């Protein structure tokens, strides 16, 4: 468990921040941008939770916890100082977390009719917030993929973000009266 007694440390006042292995990097580093965007997706999910209830709210709560795990994974380099110390190994996203998202996607999508058009983000408040969270998760995924092209990254982290955005899409449709309230794209309609 993490215990925070001081909120500010002044450690970042010169434009650097500490990673999970204690190394310092510029705040604009791709790794920091990636886990910062995961945090942004988490905040957007928190907003979506204000508009849902029951199992959807519980599912999103589990996902928020997973996203903290993902942030911890990304802030601790695979080849960093903690890589050699197996007793203090870094927290990593695991395949079971990805598999849980897949099962949730399959279960939630089973109630929806197939799409015959793209969907515009919106409908009701819950769906709109879920769509916003989905687009932020996609941005996080792009950043993690860019990071993975430059450094070793846990492949389950990329998979998790990919499945998460799919689940948020399905949940947005469920929030829109199981798709009946979806706003469909009409190509060229405003020409």
Image: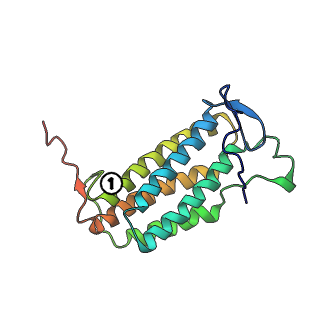
**Left or right: residue 71 compared with residue 125:** right
Which quarter of the rendering shows the C terminus?
top left
| Disc 1 packing (10 Å; few <14; some 14–19; many ≥20) | many
Say above or below: 152 vs 87: above
Pick the quarter of the image with the N terminus.
bottom right
Q: Residue at x 60, y 63 (%)?
A: 97
User: Where residue 185 sits: x, y (%)?
Assistant: 22, 49
Q: Disc 1 marks which residue?
A: 128
Instruction: Examine the rendered structure and indicate whether residue 126 appears above or below residue 54.
Output: above
Query: Which of 159/13 is in front?
Result: 13
The image quadrant that residue 125 belongs to is bottom left
Looking at the picture, the colour scheme in use is rainbow
Residue 15, percent from left and from top: 65, 27
Q: Based on the displayed image, in which of its 4 quarters is residue 26 positioned?
A: top right
Residue reaching furthest front?
6
Q: How many marks?
A: 1
**29 or 146, nearer to the observer:** 29
x and y, in percent, of residue 99 in the image = 57, 65
Which residue is depicted at the point 50% across and 57% down? Answer: 163
Residue at the outermost top position: 14
Circle 1 SS class: helix
Q: Nearer the viewer, residue 69 or 94?
A: 69
Residue 20 is situated, as x and y percent measured from the top left of the image, at 74, 44
The answer to whether residue 144 shows anywhere in this view is no
Q: Is residue 7 visible?
A: yes
Residue at the image position 74 percent from the left and 33 percent from the top: 24
> On the rendered structure, is 84 left or right of 111?
right
């Amino acid at each position: 468990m993490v215990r925070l007694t001081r909120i500010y440390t002044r450690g970042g006042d010169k434009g650097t921040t500490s990673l999970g292995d204690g190394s310092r990097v510029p705040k604009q580093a791709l790794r920091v941008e990636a886990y910062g965007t995961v945090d942004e997706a988490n905040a957007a999910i928190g907003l979506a939770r204000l508009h849902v209830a029951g199992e959807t709210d519980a599912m999103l709560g589990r996902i928020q916890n997973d996203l903290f795990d993902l942030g911890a994974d990304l802030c601790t380099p695979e080849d960093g100082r903690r890589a050699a110390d197996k007793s203090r190994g870094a927290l990593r996203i695991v395949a079971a977390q990805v598999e849980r998202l897949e099962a949730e996607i399959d279960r939630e999508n089973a109630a929806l009719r197939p799409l015959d058009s793209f969907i515009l983000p919106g409908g009701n408040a819950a769906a709109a917030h879920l769509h916003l969270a989905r687009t932020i998760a996609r941005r996080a995924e792009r950043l993690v993929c860019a990071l993975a092209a430059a450094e070793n990254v846990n492949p389950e982290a990329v998979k998790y973000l990919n499945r998460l955005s799919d689940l948020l899409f399905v949940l947005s449709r469920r929030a829109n009266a199981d798709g009946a309230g979806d706003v469909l794209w009409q190509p060229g309609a405003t020409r």
